Amino acid sequence: MTAIVANSRQERWWNSRTAHRFMNHHLALLGMVMIAVLTLACVLGPYLLPYDSLYIDLRARFAPPFTGHHYLGTDPLGRDLAARLFMAGRVSLLVGFSAMLLSTLIGTLVGVLAGYRGGWIGTTLMRTVDGFLSFPSIFLVLALAAALKPSPMMITVVIAATSWMEVARIVEAEVRSLREREFVQAGRMLGLSGTHIMFREILPNAMGPIIVAATLTVARAILMEAYISFLGYGIQPPLPSWGNMLNGAQQYLGSAPWLAIIPGAAITIAVTSFNFIGDGLRDALDVRGDHT
Amino acid sequence: MRGFLLNRLSQSLVLLLIVSVIGFVVLNLIPGGPLAQFGLDPSMTQDDLNRLKEQLGLNRPLWIQYMDWAWRLVQGDWGHSFRDGAPVLDVIGRHLVATLLLMGSSTVIAIAIGTWIGIRGATHRYSVFDYLATVGAMVALSIPTFWFGLVGIYVFSLRLGWLPAGNMYTIGDGSALNYLHHLIMPSIVLALVHVAIWSRYMRTATLDVISQEFVKTARAKGLSERRILMKHVVGNALLPMITLAGMQLPSVLTGALVTETVFTWPGMGRLFLDSLGYSDYPVVMGLLMFSAILVVLCNLIADIVVAIIDPRIRLS
């Protein structure tokens, strides 16, 4: 079966102009480099450091950063902060990335179905999207996270379950505008099935906005994980995450401010990087967007 | 206008219906359902739980339970707090003012600063200011609100000692100035993200208006740039911002919950977290529904206000 991609943006994506535009976007490049460094540090860091992230040493509690053997200092239990930061990064980045994959999948499915079918199916689906968007996301996430068993997997599912709506809206609008184009009518004329037209003909043409939205969703998912873990309903200790490292840091703010400052800086750097990359992709893929 | 109003009202009613279904589903996803809290009590036997289920009608089909729950919601019977037995709406009412105060002041800050940055960015497009504002907005959107609050407390409360680190007022001192003093840091912390969003949208809206014909006409008439900006551009650019203000409400409420936690501000967000800690599900559910209803209503009001100001919308 040959897909009709005459109108497709697919062949234009990776040609030199798009790549060129992305490479010329300095912030996006900066974001790429920072994410690469962070990921590398989180993957390799724990092997290179002499301390385990869970090794408790009460004689070395509250060591300040940049002094002695603990490069970034220690926490109230004397655990090495650098080791914890890298282990936490693995968890936070993985949760953010998986939540993005899951929510993009849900959002794309809902959006394609609503946009292509239209009618009462489309209306019902898009009204449901509006309904979900009426809730302050953290209220929903916390209510679900408190009720369910808080494993990293469950946190990922809960975050994805409350962040698929933006993608659904973007995909729905895109698919609705493509639905009546000639290449789709040609597909219908050829007797292709609805599923084939939706996912093989229309979807590839809507990939640009989806990729941009997905990148920004990683940023939002990392932030959401940090929020709920900070509030104590996300990733549970002893497994560290950037969010739960900050949980409890407030009471030591006067005596050990690095406990709050360092993990927060890591979150900010990761989220900023993904936002920069998303911005660069939007320019490079020529997606018009009103967000930021 | 009448048709527009009816149309928007019916849309909002449908939305409220969907919101209530989502809320009901969440309530029933909680393992053990609405009686989860009592299942842990050792003096409750399984027989007791079954009897309670029968009494409360929890063994009926789900859709009948939903109708019953929704009907009581409409009548204002939102259940009673597990903690002190007070009606849920009373409990929410006690915390509403603090949250509205925080949200209101931070919205004022966000609109004032965001509008200024947005207009300046649009009139000085591609300038250093515009570039810094763009990058700054993206960074501001990436800073976790609670972390910004913690850094603020560290710098301004612990190091400099200028601002209080938390609470709404000093006990024994209920003066307006004292409230204001406590309000400064939380409202700025909550405003940061919205300054960023507001300035981005304002920049786009201003650029849209500037490129329109009537601005060219105003220039041709020989009006000064300042006069054009003030009389013709800003007013028109602010119009879509009313809709944006309604749309931003859920994210303001999310930020408020986090900010209230960091600054021990006695609002709805703190109430939500405290209630979660106590497994006080009637209050949790009440706040979930209350915030969503608030969002739907504010969006409706925003749309109506825009329609009153702008005849193009209500006539189309």
Image: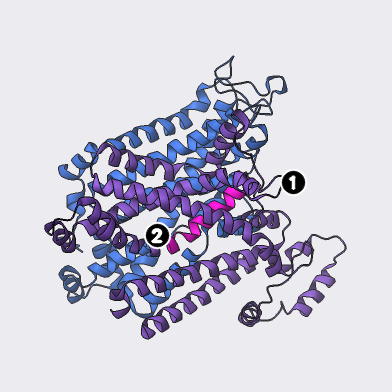
Per the rendering, the colour in which chain A appears is: blue
Q: Is residue A279 left or right of residue B89?
A: left
The tag on residue B203 is none
Corner quadrant of residue B31: bottom right
- Tell me which chain the residue with mark 2 is part of: A
Task: Give, as a three-letter code, the residue at label 2.
Answer: Glu
Q: Is residue A164 left or right of residue B281?
A: left
Per the rendering, the colour in which chain B appears is: purple
The tag on residue B171 is 1
Residue name at image x 42 percent, y 84 percent: B6
Residue name at image x 49 percent, y 65 percent: A134
In this view, the residue in front, A21 or B75, is: B75
In this view, the residue in front, B203 or A101, is: B203
In this view, the residue in front, A72 or A193, is: A72
Residue B244 x/y as whole percent: 39, 61
Farthest residue toward the top? A68
Task: Give the main secondary structure, helix, strand or loop, of the magenta stretch.
Answer: helix
Is residue A112 on the magenta stretch?
Answer: no
Q: Is residue A146 left or right of residue A13?
A: right
Position of residue B288 relative to residue B108, above or below, is below
The tag on residue A166 is 2
Both marks 2 and 1 on one chain: no
Residue A74 x/y as whole percent: 62, 25
Residue B177 in view in this figure: yes
